Amino acid sequence: MTLSNNQKRKMKSAARLYAVQALFQMEASGQSADSVEREFEDHRFGAIYDEGEMQEGDVDLFRSLVDRAVNEQAKIDQMTDRALVAKWPIGRIDPTLRAVFRAAGAEMIEAKTPPRVVIVEFLDVVSAFFPEGKESRFVNAVLDHMAREARPEAFA
């Protein structure tokens, strides 16, 4: 079965959302990346609940984001800290936003997806968690700063 470009895009978007959820869950529960990845792939990707069906996710992108966020966490957190005001170190940030910054940072340092696409995609993730929208401007500013540090050539 061949997937359309739209289906592939939706699967990548779902993978980003799942990566944020997985990173949040790992921090909250202390589970390993491997166990959380397996749980998501076995029980969340394409799962059907009373509220509706979960989107099938791009497994490769999901694993890549989670693994890179874990393996490069110090580097990503330092990039995030430099983008934050001095009074707000990453440890004081909402854990959901911390997971967003780590997943987005992981995708930015991989350098396959254009930084502006990464920012737009993760702003969509933020609006799923914070529908009232005030976090979006804050996240946009932090991600823009991180992108300029991770990929300066994309902004030249």
Image (cartoon, helix red, strand yellow):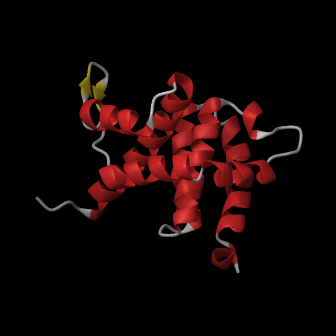
Q: Vertically, is 45 above or below 67?
A: above
Q: Quadrant of the C terminus?
A: bottom right
Tag count in the figure?
0
Query: Who's the residue at 30% across and 58% down the image?
Result: 8
Q: Quadrant of the N terminus?
A: bottom left
Residue 74 at x, y = what percent? 66, 49
Left or right: where 127 falls relative to 35: right
Query: Who's the residue at 45% across and 42% down the image?
Result: 19
Residue 143 at x, y = what percent? 67, 54
Q: Residue furthest top?
A: 50
Query: Who's the residue at 60% across and 54% down the image?
Result: 105
The image quarter containing residue 40 is top left
Query: Who's the residue at 73% across and 44% down the image?
Result: 138
- Front residue of 97/25: it is 25
Q: Vertically, is 50 above or below 81?
A: above
The image quarter containing residue 92 is top right
Q: Residue furthest left?
A: 1
Residue 2 at x, y = what percent? 15, 62
The image quarter containing residue 3 is bottom left
- Front residue of 24/143: it is 24
Residue 87 visible at all:
yes
Left or right: where 154 falls relative to 121: right
Residue 58 visible at all:
no
Residue 39 at x, y = what percent? 32, 31
